Amino acid sequence: MATKYIFVAGGVMSGVGKGVTTASVGTILHSMGYEVSCVKIDPYINVDAGTMNPLEHGETFVTNDGTECDQDIGNYERFLNRNLAKVNYMTTGSVYLSVINRERNLEYKGKCVEVVPHIPLEVISRIKKAAATDKADFLLIEIGGTVGEYQNMLFLEAVRMMKLADPGNVMLLLVSYLPIPRTIGEMKTKPTQGAVRTLNAAGLQPDLIIARSEVPVDAPRKEKISVFCNVKPQDVISAPDVESIYDIPLNFEKEGLGERVLSHFAMRRKKVRDLRAWRRFVAKSHAGRGKVRIGIVGKYFETGEFSLMDSYISVIEAIKHAAWDIGKSPEIVWLSAGDYEKNPRALRELREFSGIIVPGGFGSRGVEGKIAAIRFCRENKIPYFGLCFGMQLAVIEFARNVCRIKGATSREFEKGAEHPVIDVMESQKDKLRAKEYGGTMRLGAYPCKLRSGTLAHDTYKKSAISERHRHRYEVNPQYVMKLSEGGLKFSGVSPDHSLMEIAELPKTKHPFFLGTQFHPELQSRPLAPHPLFVAFLKAASMRRLLRSRA
Ligand code: GLN
């Protein structure tokens, strides 16, 4: 079967959940028995998402092959329960870079290389490569931004060219927004009509409109959108706000979205799969009894001008998956490391939490506050889980306060440090010297060996694992002996024993104190929660039980 290409564009405004909508369409088509994959197109000049500030752009997600990409790739991986890679992500910058490199190599054979058609042609060839690599029956291609923006015009041009060449295998979805202005109290369709006109001006007509709104779109409104936007009423899909993003596929199923897509391509559902497992998971997600209160300590939490949910989306989702898996309902609280620096007494609030996480991070701001929080967790037996940076800081804390290595720190904060217990990785030194920052960290999946008789080994229940990384610094091998003698266990190491990948305290000393040099959150899936998060949440929920009994 020839791959069916489904483009997803956004209308009216951003931030209405185009990524999870695209991922949910994928979940539905997958449940109908088809192979589904996704591509995300970002309209930025950045060659990848690794150089973007997570507070402006959201989390940098990392795939197995080490691509630093948009958080939506994480949504696709979670909803489709499949691994994606470099072919599934492109930015304007990466597209131009390929075209310009090809021009420099004389590959255009003396032709004038032009924005149109050469840029859309490069986009199309990448889309086709993704379809072939992933053996996709359906390839969903999400175009970042909103129609009418200068930035994504060339991508819409690629859609137009693909539709022209192969109309039977291409479909265009518009995810639009229907506001309900408070003073009017009524759902308005005009902005969506405008978005469709803008698409029309680009030579495109949407085949299906997903109407995002606060409440469901009623039949008269569907009729109106149908008439004014030139789609059948049954091709207007109502997508109201929902409690959890994981409810969206179930709403789409109710709206008959899958059937509409199949009918567009004159296809039928295959009866090999269904949504049963997803439905069971969603039911669990609403049935959690008893709260687990997880505090996340970070440096960005003071200003409140941005969406932390976006910056730490994989951590948040991993906590949810694990909490629901053990029948609990998670409560996530942002804790500001800066407060602990200004006022150490503020640390006492950590007692109110079932567990504490220090997630990934860069730079020295807030570090002393985070280290103080980790010390408090260690000394007061509060479950602690360190993710990458959070592991490095736990090692520093242990070096300073248990091994009595005065001034222990990371080379990241102090170039001439006397005791850099966390140091630049050997392989990173040349890159830093040459100021080659983009895409050069230790990225993607690497194997790791687990030592038996450790918390890590008991949790994974195997001795060889593979986890995803994104860092330049590591535990300094020169201090491993000293730290181990002090009682810190390196329970996970690289196969050649050179890199310390997991540090933990024995169960006899602490209910859960573990840090990973990798990012386990990147591999947590709704239908397959990450074992370390499950173990952490279990320990956290125990603490809660003990406290409330006391
Ligand atoms: N800044 C640290 C490093 O580069 C940790 C990175 C992270 O948390 N992703 O090693």
Image (cartoon, rainbow, N blue to C red):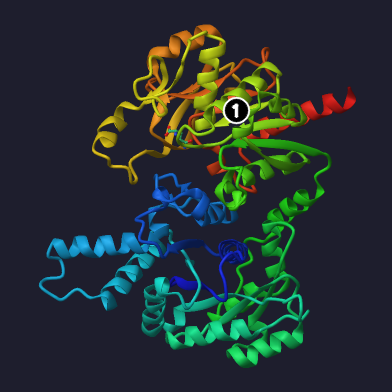
In percent of the image, x 47 and y 35: which residue is there? 466
Residue 516 screen position, x and y as percent: 52, 29
Quarter where residue 288 is shown: top right
Instruction: Identify the residue at the far left of this view.
Output: 110
Residue 445 screen position, x and y as percent: 43, 39
Query: Measured along the vertical axis of the image, is residue 443 above or below residue 251?
Result: above
Confirm whether residue 58 shows in the render. no
50 relative to 386 in the view: left or right:
left
In percent of the image, x 59 and y 56: which residue is there? 79
Q: Quadrant of the N terminus?
A: bottom left
Q: How many marks?
A: 1
Identify the residue position indicated by label 1 in the image. Answer: 341
Confirm whether residue 20 shows in the render. yes
Secondary element under disc 1, as helix, strand or loop, is helix
Quarter where residue 243 is shown: bottom right
Taking the image in four quarters, ligand 1 sits in the one at top left
66 relative to 20 in the view: left or right:
left
